[in-house]
Amino acid sequence: MVIELSFIWAGLIAFAVLAYVLLDGFDLGIGILFPFLKDRDERHLAMNTIAPVWDGNETWLVLGGGGLLAAFPLAYAIVMPALYPLIITMLLGLIFRGVAFEFIHRTNRMKAFWEIGFCLGSLIAAISQGMALGALVQGITIDGRAYGGGNWDWLTPFSALTALALVVGYATLGATWLILKTEGETLTRARRFAWPLGIALLVLIGVVSIVTPFLRPEYLERWFGWPSGVYSAVVPILLACAAWMLWSGLRGRHTLRPFLATVAIFVLTYIGLGISFYPSLVPPSLSIIDAAAPDTSLRFLLIGASILIPMILVYTAYSYWVFRGKVRPEDGYH
């Protein structure tokens, strides 16, 4: 069986976006939790848990966006005008967060300002990503081969709901990451954060999951039709297992299990999103095949991707391996 190159590229871009969400998610979560940490020493300890890896995590965002432009130029040309305000706001948040990350350790007079900047940059980036996701799930109006909607189509109650869910999800990832990487009082505080955040995340996922199938008739068919509904039912069952894994990990005072459970929750919700979208790339009417570049271009790009993606994976895995283990107050990356 010959697999369409467009579907291979859709899978690669989906993987890159998922890798970004998971890896940069706990980075952003640390920033969101920043004001709730005990003091400046604890905040700097939290930053040191992500300092060796945070900038490398954003490589996947570049790969996902660049891959969309190269492999699916029509989708890129439609999605970007629809989400320009959110994309620009997200990038500004990420830039300000990155600058704040470095300046916090280089100044004394402005330290409080940059600490606030690190938190606000993380929060703004998370909200922008969540609203962009909600706008994409709702569907983007297409007129011919261009965006046909208005300037504010992305701003709806549903996109606000998905933004809230993503902020809570990132905060949960951040809390469970601190459980994994810290000790003592910081670990105890992170575990206290993880309980209400985990519950709120599961509730919000439930609400979004209930609302989403009724946004478009094709979503409803994929989740509740026959026989597609039978296969789709596996996702909520596995999600319940991941929720139990999170609960048992927190209750049993495990350090790794809560983080893995939160990652599993993100992966399963992402799969659920894929079930709703497939075979569309830009709901409701632009399919993966229709949006793809010519096969000659996809084939040429695939040669580069087959070299670049394994290199990024090896580098990322090596970075996490080198900086594995607990981070202590006396340790420092800067």
Image: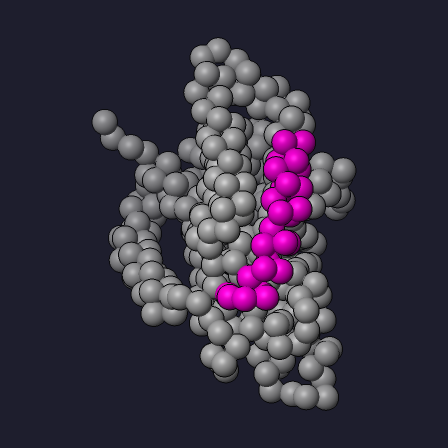
Residue 63 against residue 162 in the figure, above or below: below
Q: Quadrant of residue 117?
A: bottom right
Q: Quadrant of residue 192?
A: bottom right
Q: Where is residue 267 shown, x and y percent of the image?
A: 47, 41
In reply to whether residue 183 is colored magenta, the answer given is: yes
In reply to whether residue 141 is colored magenta, the answer given is: no
Residue occupying image coordinates x 58% and y 60%: 188
Q: What segment carries the magenta color?
A: 182-208
Residue 242 against residue 233 in the figure, above or below: below
34 left or right of 70 in image: right
312 left or right of 154 in image: left
What secondary structure prevails in the magenta region? Answer: helix
- The answer to whether residue 137 is visible is yes
Q: Where is residue 297 shown, x and y percent of the image?
A: 34, 48
Residue occupying image coordinates x 65% and y 50%: 167
Give 21 or 258, whichever is nearer the viewer.
Answer: 258
